[in-house]
Image (tube, grey):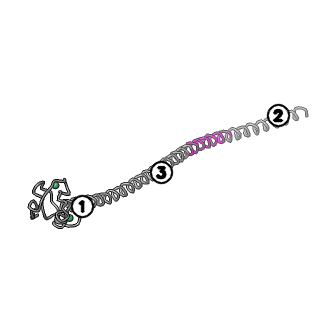
Amino acid sequence: MKVAHGEEQMKAYVAQACKASLENRHITISLNQAKVELADAEKELMWLRSTYDASQKEYEQNQKRIADLRLELERERNERKRLEEELEEVKSEVMEMSGENEETTIQKLQDEIKECKAILKCGVCFDRPKEVVITKCFHLFCYPCIQRNLEIRHRKCPGCGTPFGQSDVREVKI
Ligand SMILES: [Zn+2]
Ligand SMILES: [Zn+2]
């Protein structure tokens, strides 16, 4: 009875040991599977990380490029503004110059006309043209001014004061 009991006990132990070994095997298998899965997950994580890093880098590069482009755009805008201002300045300078030139030319012509008129006009009345010469000094005057000079017996050249008589007055043809 005691022996039988011992056998029973032994059988139970063996069965238990078998069961434990089987379980142990199962555990080992799932552990291995879990390891494989973990390795896969780690690989995937690494891949995701590198992808993330790459896109982060790309994003940063894009941001930098945008900033550069903005800067360049700003520079070009400023340059354009500067050129436009310069153009306006040149335009107004050209306008001023052409206006000045026109004015200067007119002024010059008017001065010349004045000079010519002064040369041709009698220096006493500044009105009538020169038409007679005093042959003693060769000064020219209009006929009425010299005639008046003779009539009031002043008889001195209005230009230089040289005395002259009726016979010293001659008509000129200009
Ligand atoms: Zn005169
Ligand atoms: Zn004279």
- Relative to 18, 105 lies left or right: left
Give the quarter of the figure containing the N terminus.
top right
* Residue annotated with mark 3: 74
Between the C-alphas of marks 1 and 3, the distance is 59 Å
Q: Earlier in the sequence, mark 1 or mark 2?
A: 2
Q: In this view, which residue lies farthest toward the right?
A: 1
Q: Nearer the viewer, mark 1 or mark 2?
A: 1
Quadrant of residue 154 within the rendered picture = bottom left
Please, what secondary structure does the residue beneath circle 2 have?
Answer: helix
Between the C-alphas of marks 1 and 2, the distance is 152 Å
Which percent across, then down, holds residue 20? 76, 37
Q: Is residue 23 or residue 161 the one in the foreground?
A: 161
Quadrant of residue 33 within the rendered picture = top right
Please, what secondary structure does the residue beneath circle 1 have?
Answer: helix
User: Which span of residues is magenta-colored?
Assistant: 31-52
- Relative to 170, 99 lies left or right: right
Q: Is residue 106 or residue 78 the one in the foreground?
A: 106
Quadrant of residue 17 within the rendered picture = top right
* Residue annotated with mark 2: 10
Which percent across, then down, holds residue 51? 55, 45
Q: Is mark 2 within 8 Å of ligand 1?
A: no
Amino acid of disc 3: Glu
Q: Residue at x 85, y 35 (%)?
A: 9
Please, what secondary structure does the residue beneath circle 3 have?
Answer: helix
* Residue annotated with mark 1: 114
Is mark 1 in CB contact (under 8 Å) with mark 3? no
Between the C-alphas of marks 3 and 2, the distance is 93 Å
Magenta segment: does it hold 23? no
Magenta segment: does it hold 43? yes
Q: Earlier in the sequence, mark 3 or mark 2?
A: 2
Instruction: Estimate how packed mark 3 is, as few (under 14), some (14 to 19) or many (20 or more) residues with alpha carbons within 10 Å.
Output: few
Amino acid of disc 1: Lys
